[in-house]
């Protein structure tokens, strides 16, 4: 209680109670809950809980299962889970919430910062923590049903600790220099298939859509696009014009005298501290402090110039509509940026540079703009700084019914957006001069150049697939290393790797506030991202399908037999595989790897364990060959520490995988028999 009292003293105590925050909202039925109406006022407490949870990173990490698609879905999901927790005897307890604040310093600091910059009362935060803790206890109770069995643990440890070595060749359509012109039929087919699809970006977190049995990256639908103009206030250029004056030196010295504690010299190790402290002399920090004065002068000067510029550009915009946006103005009534720059030069002696785009730019195009494309805006009420590509896509003309950030910014064509600043300290005033909403091309001629280029790339990719199949068949006979050398192809043999690796980021957070790490799917060394993980899965599937008593190449180490989980010797080949000289013959045919979607080229002939993996989204093909497998020795598998750690990680991952489905919006609403109102 004393700790909470101290916390509340450092925040302003005039908060917004639940009753006040809920007042004034219209009450309406949002759906049917097991035969009873559910109203918007019923969801109001859950809505406050979700808002608090998402504003506090510590709590957000605990509730990463909240539905990200809209505030209503998350609020309904949380309401139903809390209702289910109460039905099972897990009731919210504010005393437990106070204990969380006492035990977890990061949470305590986040709450203090949150209360000092919001209208929420401390009671709202305590209730949100208590409600989340009740749902967590319910989730912990349910997750006990997902505890792994002993065979699962042994299989998991085998996957985690066993390693393989491979060789691979990458073939890409981009490497094909010249391809014949595509047929008109292919061009028309691509246009009709992808005219309503947005072009896929390699940086996207999702895969391209599956069309005609392939996930090609093509797409001809125009995305939301804008045109922009901006003024740049160049910090380095202004600093280069400034000359150091006597006043700057005097100001630097006054700062030195008033902040000498910042320049204190710590006593050397092994020596006792003397009674009089030692400080760095002014001559040693003189240049640093003078530069600080100049930086401050430039920042203050830019601040005054930007305020003046925004006043000039904002003069024509005088009428705000009831919706919160300004009444639209024709471009001829806007204050010209060139005119503003001329006035700034006359008044301050500095003329900002002016830039503008003559082409339509999507979010990706805005990111590629030098300087301003990486700049961000910081404004009170935002949980994090927002970049230009994010802000520009929130323009009113693209989404007239936008709520939240769109209404907060009043971002619209011709009206200046929030001031941006890049990593070098340069600042930008900008406005959108035109917008174009996403739409499909009406005719082939509108995008013919792009479609024909994609058709050539597709023809090149087909050539890559044919070459990859020939390479795979040759590698089956003489080995991929020799086949690649004959065809003058670049071959890579990365070091051995495992199927699983320790995650660089926390998989979850313990109640103590400590991050919990675990094993995640690995990638082939040298091939990062989703493609590398896909290749790793294929390689280990190839290793599991291969004959346990042979290897995929003659480089197999036959010294020292080891056993797998079933007690079989898998390092030393049987006598039937040795020739008269005692050497190991190439292995016999291996069972093909099953793949119902035909996205993997299977091996069916005798020889080395080889496979071809087409990557449609990147128009690439990998020919991969297994060189060596190294299973985990049985003595390591019996190691108590490894099994304890593996059990913890497997239990964590199994529960997370199970709980993410069980806590999900679809599962929760289905269990509660909720039907949304139409």
Image (cartoon, rainbow, N blue to C red):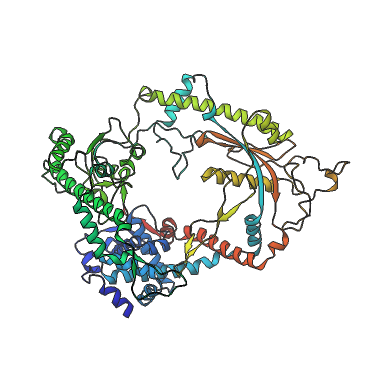
Q: Quadrant of the N terminus?
A: bottom left
Q: Residue at x 33, y 77 (%)?
A: 3
Q: Would residue 378 be visible to someone looking at this image?
A: no
Most extreme residue toward the bottom is 2
Q: From what the image shows, is residue 146 above or below residue 210?
A: below
In the visual, does 390 lie left or right of 473?
A: left
Q: From what the image shows, is residue 550 above or below residue 171?
A: below
Q: Would residue 409 be visible to someone looking at this image?
A: yes
Which is nearer the eye, 259 or 201?
Answer: 259
Q: Residue at x 26, y 66 (%)?
A: 116
* Residue 434 in picture, x, y percent from top left: 24, 35
In the visual, does 481 lie left or right of 674?
A: right
Which is nearer the eye, 291 or 227?
Answer: 291
> Image quadrant of residue 258?
bottom left
Which is nearer the eye, 376 or 95?
Answer: 376
In the visual, does 539 lie left or right of 442?
A: right
* Count of labels in the image: 0
* Residue 47 in picture, x, y percent from top left: 31, 62
In the visual, does 676 lie left or right of 479?
A: left
> Image quadrant of residue 399?
top left
* Residue 612 in picture, x, y percent from top left: 62, 36
* Residue 41 in picture, x, y percent from top left: 27, 63
């Amino acid at each position: 209680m004393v700790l909470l009292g101290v916390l509340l003293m450092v925040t302003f105590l005039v908060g917004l109670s639940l009753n006040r925050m809920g007042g004034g909202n219209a009450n309406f039925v949002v759906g049917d809950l097991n035969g009873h109406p559910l109203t918007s006022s019923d969801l109001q407490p859950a809505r406050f809980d979700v808002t608090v949870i998402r504003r506090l990173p510590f709590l957000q990490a605990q509730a990463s299962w909240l539905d990200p698609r809209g505030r209503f879905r998350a609020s309904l999901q949380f309401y139903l889970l809390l209702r289910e927790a109460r039905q099972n005897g897990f009731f919210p307890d504010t005393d437990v919430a106070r204990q969380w604040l006492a035990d977890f310093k990061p949470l305590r600091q986040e709450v203090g910062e949150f209360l000092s910059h919001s209208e929420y009362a401390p009671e709202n935060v305590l209730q949100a923590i208590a409600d989340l803790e009740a749902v967590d206890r319910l989730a912990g109770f349910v997750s006990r049903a997902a505890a792994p069995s002993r065979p699962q643990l042994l299989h998991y440890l085998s996957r985690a600790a066993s390693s393989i070595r491979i060789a691979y060749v990458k073939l890409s359509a981009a490497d094909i220099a010249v391809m014949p012109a595509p047929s008109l039929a292919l061009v028309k087919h691509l246009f009709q298939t992808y005219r309503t699809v947005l072009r896929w970006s390699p940086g996207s977190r999702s895969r391209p859509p599956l069309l005609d049995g392939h996930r090609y990256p093509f797409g001809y639908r125009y995305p939301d696009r804008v045109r922009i103009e901006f003024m740049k206030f160049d910090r380095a250029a202004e600093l280069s014009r400034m000359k150091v004056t006597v006043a700057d030196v005097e100001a630097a010295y006054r700062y030195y005298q008033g902040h000498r504690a910042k320049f204190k010299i710590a006593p050397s190790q092994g020596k006792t501290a003397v009674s009089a402290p030692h400080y760095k002399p002014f001559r040693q920090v003189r240049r640093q402090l003078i530069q600080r004065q100049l930086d401050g002068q430039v920042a203050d000067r830019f601040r005054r110039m930007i305020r003046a510029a925004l006043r000039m550009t904002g003069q024509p915009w005088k009428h705000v509509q009831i919706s919160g946006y300004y009444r639209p103005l024709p471009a001829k009534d806007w204050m010209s940026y060139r005119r503003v720059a001329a006035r700034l030069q006359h008044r301050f002696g500095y003329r900002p540079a002016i830039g503008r785009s003559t082409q339509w730019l999507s979010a990706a195009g805005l990111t590629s703009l030098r300087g301003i494309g990486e700049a961000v805006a910081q404004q009170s009420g935002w949980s994090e700084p927002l970049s230009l590509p994010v802000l520009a896509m929130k323009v009113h003309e693209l989404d007239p019914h936008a709520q939240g950030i769109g209404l907060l910014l009043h971002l619209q064509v011709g009206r200046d957006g929030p001031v941006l600043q890049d990593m070098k300290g340069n600042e930008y005033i900008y406005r959108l001069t035109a917008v174009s909403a996403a739409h499909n091309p009406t005719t082939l001629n509108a995008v013919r150049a792009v479609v024909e280029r994609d058709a050539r790339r597709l023809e090149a990719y087909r050539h890559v697939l044919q070459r990859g199949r020939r390479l795979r068949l040759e590698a089956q006979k003489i080995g991929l290393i020799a086949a690649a050398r004959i065809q003058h192809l670049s071959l890579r043999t990365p070091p051995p790797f495992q199927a699983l690796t320790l995650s660089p980021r926390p998989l979850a957070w313990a109640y103590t506030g400590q991050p919990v790490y675990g094993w995640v799917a690995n990638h082939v060394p040298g091939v990062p991202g989703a493609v590398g993980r896909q290749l790793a899965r294929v390689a280990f599937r190839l290793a599991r399908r291969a004959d346990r008593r042979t290897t995929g190449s003659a480089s197999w180490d036959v010294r020292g037999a080891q056993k797998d989980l079933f007690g079989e010797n898998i390092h030393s080949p049987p006598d039937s595989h040795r020739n008269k000289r005692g050497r190991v013959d190439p292995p016999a045919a291996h069972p093909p790897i099953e793949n119902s979607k035909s996205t993997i080229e299977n091996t069916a002939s005798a020889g080395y364990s080889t496979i071809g993996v087409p990557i449609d989204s990147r128009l690439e093909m990998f020919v991969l060959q297994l060189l060596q497998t190294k299973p985990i020795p049985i003595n390591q598998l019996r190691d108590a520490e490894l099994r304890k750690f593996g059990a913890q990680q497997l239990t964590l991952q199994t529960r997370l995988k199970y709980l993410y489905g069980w806590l999900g919006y679809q599962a929760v609403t289905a269990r509660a028999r909720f039907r949304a109102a139409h």
